[in-house]
Image (cartoon, rainbow, N blue to C red):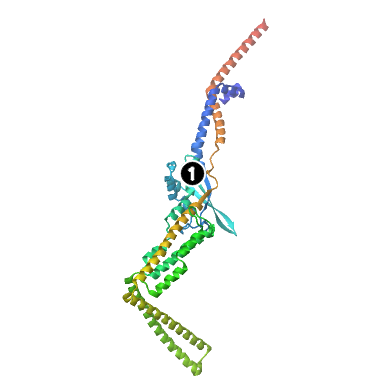
Amino acid sequence: MEENMQDEGLSLGEIFKVIFRRWLLLILITAAVTLVGILGISLIVNPLQTMYGISFSVDYPGSENFRYPDGTAFRYQDIVSEDNLTEVKNGSEKFAKIDARKLYENDDISITEETEEVNGVRTPTGNYTITAKGSYFPDGNIASEFLRGIANYPVNYINSKVSLMTYRDNLTSYDAVKTYEQKIAYLVAQRDYIVNQYESLTATYGSVYIPSGYDRSLRELSSEVERSFSEEDQATMENDLKINGYVFDREYYASDTRVKIDSYSKEITDNTRIIDALRTERDALIDAIQAGSGSATITDSLKSFNDRISELIVLNSQRQNEINRLQENLNRLENDYDEVAAARFHTRLTGFYNALSEAADTFKGVSVSIYAKESKVVFDTYSAVASGGISLAIGAVVSVIVGFVLACIVICIIDLPAYLRRKKYALAVKAEEARTDKENEHEAEKE
């Protein structure tokens, strides 16, 4: 066709004249190619090349230590775990078409941690970015919603864990032990534990912070715990128990006390043997000193012997006093136990237990309230940011150009051959007419 164009002197103007005669076909082909191009870019090319990313920070009480409230370590990689992806997918019908397992197994989703250099050391800032391949999502809105759901993993985890925490492990142990001494010790541990928990929150939010749903500050709530089983209450109960020897479980106490008495008695016997041996060695040193062979080293050793002997004598005395006390308690238990006083003691101790149990429940409510309010994921942007792919505006322009060129080619293929034949025929006719005119002129000249 190009040779014909050159042979026949086909001009650019003639080509466009042929093309624009078919202006309707030109428009239709251009529009069709443009539409196909835009659809191909938006439905095929861009989903394969587009990446959706969303940046956010995580903040919750204790986040500076990268620990959750239950003590487990905060690992930002868990945010894009398969379990979390599946849970978010199953949480809404909007995500039904998202293949969470494939997204995870193909490593088409990732999370990065932002760090900063502090004194030459790279330190986490608490800011993160999740990036996922666009082909898994129907559109950007679904991608944004899905990624926000994934990013909320730390807050969801915290709220679920806090709601399960009871803050009463010491009270559970209180129920399990069989002596009042141990029960008092666990009440003390429970009181101190709850007070320390309040102090930890106070260090973060201040003593005047009032949790949502409460009318008292953290300091006031902590003071209530201290008053529920004060140090004075503790001393009173311990002294009463020591003087009167109240027993929680008689059979256990009698058996345990006899074991302790036997153990202390054996310890006294062993210590006495050690004392006798030390005295023998000490007397030998004294004889050496009296014989004139003493030295500073021997004198120091003599002092060491005397100090050790004194320690063991004091220890034996303490153990004997304890044996006497335990024996008195056994005798009292068997012969003169004050059941009424013991019942009053038990009732009072139970009252302290109940008060600390309520304090534990109160703290749980406070903890749930604070974590629910103060635990949050803060997004840099509400919608995920798309990157990669081809701009639809640019794609549309390119598609129009390609469509126009293709339409021109199609029209040329269809109409140019016929146009060339007509032109060739016209030229031949014109040439024949010119030849005839020339011959006529030539004949005229002859005449």
Q: Is residue 381 above or below residue 174?
A: above
Q: Residue 408 location in percent, x, y?
A: 55, 26
**Quadrant assignment for the C terminus:** top right
Q: Residue 137 location in percent, x, y?
A: 47, 41
Q: Is residue 397 above or below residue 270?
A: above
Q: Nearer the viewer, residue 20 or 346?
A: 346
Q: Residue 366 location in percent, x, y?
A: 47, 56
- Examine the image and state in which quarter residue 387 appears: top right
Q: Residue at x 42, y 70 (%)?
A: 237
Q: Which residue is mark 1?
A: 145
Crowding near pointer 1: few (<14 within 10 Å), some, many (20+)?
some
- Examine the image and state in which quarter residue 16 appears: top right
Kind of element beneath mark 1: helix
* Residue type pointed to by label 1: Glu
Q: Residue 270 location in percent, x, y?
A: 39, 82
- Examine the image and state in which quarter residue 260 appears: bottom left
Residue at the far front in the pictured view: 340
Q: Nearer the viewer, residue 388 or 21?
A: 388
- Direction from residue 174 to residue 383 in the image, left or right: right
Q: Nearer the viewer, residue 340 or 386?
A: 340
Q: Nearer the viewer, residue 408 or 202?
A: 202
- Direction from residue 397 to residue 106 in the image, left or right: left
